[in-house]
Amino acid sequence: MKNSKKYGLDYLREQKGYLLYLLIYVFLLFVWWLCDLPWQPMAYLFLLLTVFASIQLLYGLRGYIRRRELLAMYTRQAAEGVFAAEEEKEGLEGDWYRLVKAWHEEYERQKEQNQEEKEQSGKYYTLWSHQIKTPIAAMNLLLQEEEPDLKSLKQELWKAEQYVDMALQYQRLDRSGRDLVLKEYPLETLIKKAVKNMASVFIYNKTGLQIEAMPENVLTDEKWFLFVLEQVLGNAVKYTAGREN
């Protein structure tokens, strides 16, 4: 009831059509006065106009309140993340129905997508936490020795850094490519840079790498390219340790 009164006041403030009736009244009064016509017919005419205007005003008010209440219901449903509207209607109410329905469908789609991404992230970080425990445990064992093997410590530290870098790169994936910077780079320069970053790994594992001339350019994101290439090289060294290549 309180909302209905508020909607009624809003409706009256928004209505400008009643000014037309006032102008008609003023015009008729002026014509009757100018022509010195009898006032009784004018009173009947004014009464008919007033009744007609009142009926029109009340009918419009009823529709206005119904639309405002419907919009308020849709607003509550949107805030609660539900959609239980009535059957689709025509006109302005139908447009509101379709708009809210589209919003709700998009909300449900985003909700489902976010849930899937959350589950994938949970699985990834569960696996990641188990993987990073390996180099950490190895470093703890090495540090317990009287004379820790610094080269081995550096290798385990490098592995831990790789896992941390993997987590950071995974977070970049959630940004939907906004962090990508695509440029043309000399392929040979990128490969040499990746090999330089992993020089200590090659030395520790006594593994060599022969790089031939590569004049080609590649269109890529430097960070992502180096990350993927270093992962490939790391796996290659892991399974070819101790052999010259």
Image: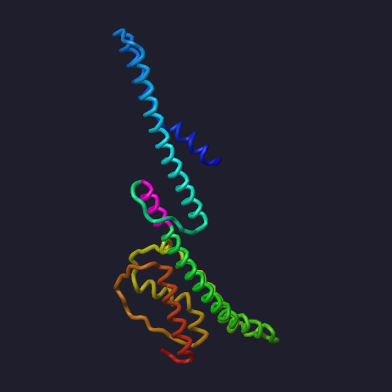
Residue 113: in magenta span: no
Image quadrant containing the C terminus: bottom left
Q: Residue at x 40, y 75 (%)?
A: 192
Image: 34 above or below 158? above
Question: Is residue 102 rendered to the left or right of residue 171?
Answer: left
Residue 100: in magenta span: yes
Query: Magenta span: helix, strand or loop, mainly?
Result: helix
Q: Residue at x 43, y 80 (%)?
A: 232
* Picture quadrant where residue 17 is located: top left
Question: Is residue 193 rendered to the left or right of residue 125?
Answer: left
Q: Residue at x 48, y 66 (%)?
A: 114
* Picture quadrant where residue 183 is located: bottom left
Q: Residue at x 38, y 48 (%)?
A: 93
* Picture quadrant where residue 140 is located: bottom right
Image: 93 above or below 47? below
State whether residue 158 appears in this view: no
Instruction: From the viewer's side, name the closer residue of 87 and 68.
Output: 87
Instruction: From the viewer's side, name the closer residue of 245 and 4.
Output: 4
Magenta residues span 92-103
Instruction: From the viewer's side, name the closer residue of 197 and 69.
Output: 69
Query: Where does residue 103 sit, x and y in percent of width and height?
Result: 42, 56
Query: Where does residue 110 sit, x and y in percent of width and height?
Result: 45, 63
Query: Where does residue 176 sit, x and y in percent of width and height?
Result: 42, 64
State whether residue 55 appears in this view: yes
Image: 81 above or below 221? above
